[in-house]
Image (cartoon, rainbow, N blue to C red):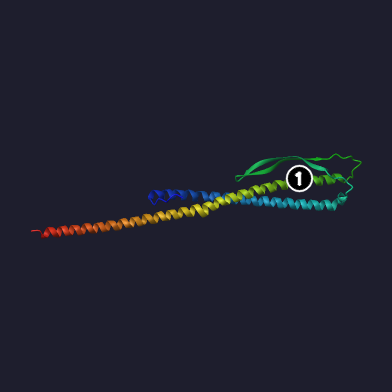
C-alpha cells in the first residue's frame, strides 16, 4: 500500500473517495437484496416442483397400480424430443428459462395395449415436464447462489474494508493537520515573544547609551 500523504490535497482526495464509496454502497446492497429475493424464489420453485412430482407419483400409484406389472412394456412410452432454453437477465444474473419443450410418445398398436396406457402416458408426460422444470430451477438456483456470493463479497468489501479504511485515513490526516496547525501557532507565538524581548533589549540598550 502506498504511503499516506498527510496533506490537505490528500484529505480532499480521500474525502472524494469516501463520498464515492458511500454513494455506491446503497445501490450495491439493494442489488444484493434483490438477488437474495430471486434466490428465494428459485428455492421455492424447486420445492414446489418436488412436491408436484411426489403428488404425481402418488396419483399414478393410486389410480394406475397396474402400471407396476413387469409384463407390460413401458420403456420409452413418452420421451423428451426437444428442449430449447432462453436466457433472461435478472439483476445482472443470466438465468435459463424454458422456451420450448417437445415430447414424443412411442407408437403403440391399439389392440395390443391396455386402455389405461393413454392415461398413463399423459401422467408420464406431466412427470417429464416437471423433471425439465426441476433441472432448470436447479440451474437458476446455482447461478443465483454464485451471484449472491459475489455481490455479498463486494458489499462487504465496501462496507467492512474500503469505507472504514478511508475514514481512518481521513481521521489520521485531520489529526496530523490539526497538530501541524497547533505547532505552527505555538512557533509563531514563541517567535513573537522572542522578537518582543529582542526589541525590548534593543530599546533598553539604546536608552543606556550616552
Residue 106 percent across, percent down from the top left: 83, 40
Q: Residue reaching furthest left?
A: 210
Q: Is residue 180 left or right of residue 138?
A: left
- Which element is circle 1 on? helix
Residue 76 percent across, percent down from the top left: 82, 43
Q: Is residue 72 left or right of residue 209?
A: right
Which image quadrant: the C terminus? bottom left
* Above-or-below relation of 114 to 180: above
The quarter of the picture where residue 109 lies is top right
Q: Is residue 138 left or right of residue 164?
A: right
Residue 92 percent across, percent down from the top left: 60, 44
Residue to which mark 1 is pinned: 129
Residue 13 percent across, percent down from the top left: 42, 48
Regarding residue 29, the answer to whether it shows in the image is no
The front one of 65 and 206 is 206
Q: Name the residue rendered at 62%, 51% in the picture.
A: 36
Circle 1 packing at 10 Å, graded few (<14), some (14-19), many (20+), is: some
Q: Name the residue rendered at 51%, 48% in the picture.
A: 24
How many numbered badges does the structure rendering display?
1
* Above-or-below relation of 192 to 74: below
The quarter of the picture where residue 190 lies is bottom left
Regarding residue 186, the answer to whether it shows in the image is yes
Amino acid at each position: 500500500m502506498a504511503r499516506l500523504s498527510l496533506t490537505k490535497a490528500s484529505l480532499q482526495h480521500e474525502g472524494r473517495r469516501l463520498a464515492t464509496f458511500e454513494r455506491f454502497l446503497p445501490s450495491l446492497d439493494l442489488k444484493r437484496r434483490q438477488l437474495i429475493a430471486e434466490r428465494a424464489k428459485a428455492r421455492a420453485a424447486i420445492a414446489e416442483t418436488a412436491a408436484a412430482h411426489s403428488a404425481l407419483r402418488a396419483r399414478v400409484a393410486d389410480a394406475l397400480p397396474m402400471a407396476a406389472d413387469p409384463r407390460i412394456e413401458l420403456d420409452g412410452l413418452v420421451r423428451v424430443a426437444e428442449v430449447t432454453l432462453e436466457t433472461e437477465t435478472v439483476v445482472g444474473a443470466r438465468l435459463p428459462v424454458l422456451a420450448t419443450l417437445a415430447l414424443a410418445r412411442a407408437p403403440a398398436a391399439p389392440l395390443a395395449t391396455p386402455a389405461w396406457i393413454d392415461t398413463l402416458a399423459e401422467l408420464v408426460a406431466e412427470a417429464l415436464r416437471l423433471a425439465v422444470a426441476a433441472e432448470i430451477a436447479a440451474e437458476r438456483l446455482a447461478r443465483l447462489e454464485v451471484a449472491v456470493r459475489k455481490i455479498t463479497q463486494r458489499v462487504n468489501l465496501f462496507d467492512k474494508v474500503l469505507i472504514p479504511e478511508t475514514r481512518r485515513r481521513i481521521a489520521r490526516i485531520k489529526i496530523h493537520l490539526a497538530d501541524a496547525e497547533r505547532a505552527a501557532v505555538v512557533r509563531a507565538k514563541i517567535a513573537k515573544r522572542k522578537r518582543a524581548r529582542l526589541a525590548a533589549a534593543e530599546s533598553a540598550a539604546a536608552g543606556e547609551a550616552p
